[in-house]
Each structure stands twice: as structure tokens, then as C-alpha cells.
Image (cartoon, helix red, strand yellow):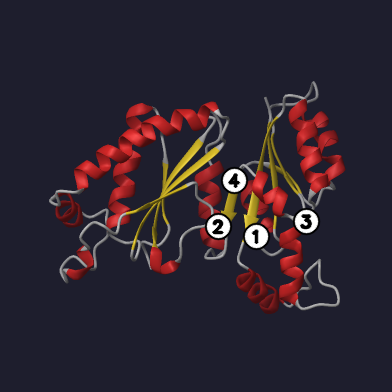
Amino acid sequence: MSDFLIITGMSGAGRSSFSDNLEDLGWFVIDNLPSELIPKVADLALGPRSQKPRVAIAVGAHGEELLHAVQQLRATGVSVNVVFLDASTDVLVRRYESTKRRHPQLDDESLAEAIERERDALATVRESADLLIDTSAMNVYALKTRVVELFGDDEGAELMKTTVMSFGYKYGIPGDVDMVIDCRFLSNPYWDEKLRPLTGRDQPILDYLYALEETEPFLDRLTSLLELLIPSYRQEGKAYLTIALGCTGGRHRSVAMAEAVAQRIKAFGVDARIHHRDVEK
């Protein structure tokens, strides 16, 4: 069956860049399609001459109309996922001010007020999206990396895409994850000057962390929890699952634990992607 991806979200959150990156991966992307035409495009893509296309449809700030179109599409048995791109209001204001572009919702109000009005209008779409991506801390290169991680090898991939992410609390908790695990209870290698320049992928950091009495029990219990949850998420039809592990700077503890978790869940059939958000900061 054909794959359909609906790309929507806040204006200025990166929809055009996201679409361009999908095109580079071989997706057929249709930009700025009115919501009411989405089911018709699906009919064409599923026609007798169709060759299992991977179709992405980029949709602007549409609320209830988009939800109705997605419901129509799913009622026909088509596999469709909705990606919602978001960013904080402060970041969106800076982006519009730097590009000198006019926000599509701007009326007789401030730019921030227009953004908040759009956010309210899209709240139901955001809540019902299969995948939320917060681009507040992403440049165009980081966004491309995320697109490749999620959609670069879709052919033959399992139905639920799982990502294990590391992050640093000092840079903010990621807003686009399903589960957040705090690793700051582990002793911090940062305070050892010899270890400070290294990352959680280096053996001296691993030796340091695995020498702690808490590390193995923590991983064992977290693995048992994920072994229970992941099949249930699959059974409920969840398309994307992101597990985020955080430490202070996102360089040592969370990186090592994310790598360990990704390796451990392979034992019950999960080939998770690994994303280290802050390791180079």
C-alpha cells in the first residue's frame, strides 16, 4: 500500500525545508495543497498505474478541514501519517524578523499575537498528529538529519519507527518526544577533567558509568519497562515513538545510556535510530 505523509504545522517552523529534504530522499512531494483535494490526490496515487509511491503532501495552516480530509483518507484504508512541525513563539518571531517575510496570519496585531492565534487554530491538529517535531533548536542541517533518520530508509521498515534520543537539560527538554528519562542521578563524568572532553560514546566514559552501582539496575529496569510498553504502542497503531534520555549537558551520561538502551531493545525486535541532540554543544 502507498505511504502518505501529511506535513503541516506552524508557519515558519520548517515545512518547506522538510519537504525539500523528503524530495531528496525520493518522495513525491506536493506543496500547498488545499485540504479538500487531499483525498483526490490519494485516489490518483492509488490508481492502477501506481508504483507504490511515497507521497508527501505539505499543507498550510488548516485546522478542522485538514482533520476531516485525513479522516476521509483513513476511511478508505489508506496508510497516512500526519507530521506537525512546531517551534516556540520567540523562535518564530526571530525567524520572520530575520527573513523580512510577512506571517500569513498577520492582521492588525503584533507578529507574536498572530503566531499565537495560529497556534490556537492548529491546537487540535497538533494534538492528533502522529509525529511532532519541535524545530526551535534546529538549523536547516539538523532538520535534514532528523528527516533522514525518520524517513531515509522507509522501504521495508517496521511500522512503528522508534528513536532513542539523548539531550541536555541545560538546552531545554525536547518537546517532540513520548518518554523522558532523567539520567542526572548518575555521577557526572564532567567533574573529572580528564573525562570532560570525551563523550558518552568513548570507552573511558563507559568504564566510569558502568562502575557505578546504579547503572546496570537502572538499565535492566528501564529495558523491562520498554519490553512491556513497546509492543503495546505497536498494537495501538502508534507510528513513531521517541524515547529521550537527558543529563545536564547532553554529552556524557545521556549519550551512553541512550546507546545502551538502543542496543538492549534490539533483543525484542526494535531496530531503533539513535539521535544525540546536544552531544556537540
Q: Which mark is residue 76?
A: none
Label 4 sits on residue: 131
Label 2 or label 3, whichever lies nearer to me, is 3
As measured in the structure, the alpha-carbon distance from the residue carrying label 2 to the one carrying label 1 is 8 Å
At mark 2, the secondary structure is helix
| The label number, if any, that marks residue 14 in the structure image | 1
Q: Are marks 3 and 1 in contact (CB under 8 Å)?
A: no
Per the model, the C-alpha gap separating discs 2 and 3 is 20 Å
Q: Are marks 4 and 3 in contact (CB under 8 Å)?
A: no
Q: Are marks 2 and 1 in contact (CB under 8 Å)?
A: yes
Measuring from the top left, give residue 85's x and y in whole percent. Answer: 64, 55
Residue kind at label 2, given as amino acid type = Leu
**Earlier sequence position, callout 2 versus callout 4:** 4
Given residues 232 and 281, the one toward you in this image is: 232
Q: CA distance from mark 3 to mark 1?
A: 13 Å
The N terminus sits in image quarter:
top right
Q: Is residue 54 left or right of residue 70?
A: left
Q: Disc 3 designates what residue? A: 61
Quarter of the image with the C terminus in it: bottom left
Residue 157 can be seen, yes or no = no
Residue 81 lies in quadrant: top right
Q: Quickly name the residue at label 2.
A: 143
